[in-house]
Image: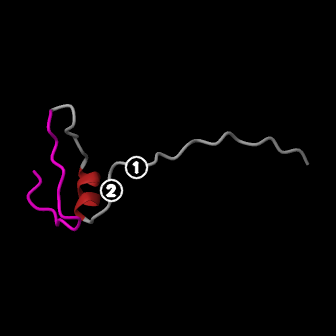
Amino acid sequence: MLLYKRIENGNFRWPRTQEEALEISTDQYQMLMQGLEIVARHPIEEVPDPEFSL
């Protein structure tokens, strides 16, 4: 249960529908409480391994 989160930007976006709600793990909850984001804004793209020849 989310009891408190400090609002620094003046608002807190609450899910409007069940589809917008997230189920989070205990680790993600701890990260959220530390002020970290649990959803990446820009996901890291996997880069294919370059082929090296020596």
Which residue sits at x=71%, y=42%? 49
Q: Quadrant of residue 31?
A: bottom left
Which image quarter: residue 19? top left
Foreground of the two, 9 or 18: 9
Main SS of the magenta segment?
Answer: loop
40 is higher (above) or lower (below) than 35: above
Residue at image position (40%, 49%) is 41
Q: Position of residue 20 (x, y in %)?
A: 21, 36
Mark 2 Cα shell of 10 Å, populated few (<14), some (14-19), many (≥20):
few
In reply to whether residue 11 is colored magenta, the answer given is yes
Q: Which tag is nearer the camera, tag 1 or tag 2?
A: 1
Residue 3 spot, x, y in % from top left: 8, 58
Task: Evaluate if marks 1 and 2 touch, with contact meaning CB atoms under 8 Å apart.
Answer: yes
Q: Is residue 16 left or right of residue 41?
A: left
How was this image coloured? Answer: secondary structure
Residue extending farthest right? 54
Q: Amino acid at mark 2?
A: Glu
Q: Is residue 30 left or right of residue 46?
A: left
Inspect the magenta stretch and tell me whether residue 49 lies in it: no
Which one is nearer the viewer's eye here, 50 or 43? Answer: 43
Q: Which residue is mark 2?
A: 37
Image position of 51 with respect to 41: above or below: above
Given residues 22 and 16, the one toward you in this image is 16
Residue 47 image-quadrant placement: top right
Please state the total of marks drawn on the protein image: 2
- Magenta span of residues: 1-17
Q: Residue at x 45, y 48 (%)?
A: 42
Residue 17 shown left or right of residue 30 in the figure: left
Going by the picture, which residue comes out furthest to the top?
A: 19
Q: Position of residue 11 (x, y in %)?
A: 17, 59
User: Residue tagged by mark 1?
Assistant: 41
Label 1, label 2: how many angstroms apart (C-alpha)?
9 Å
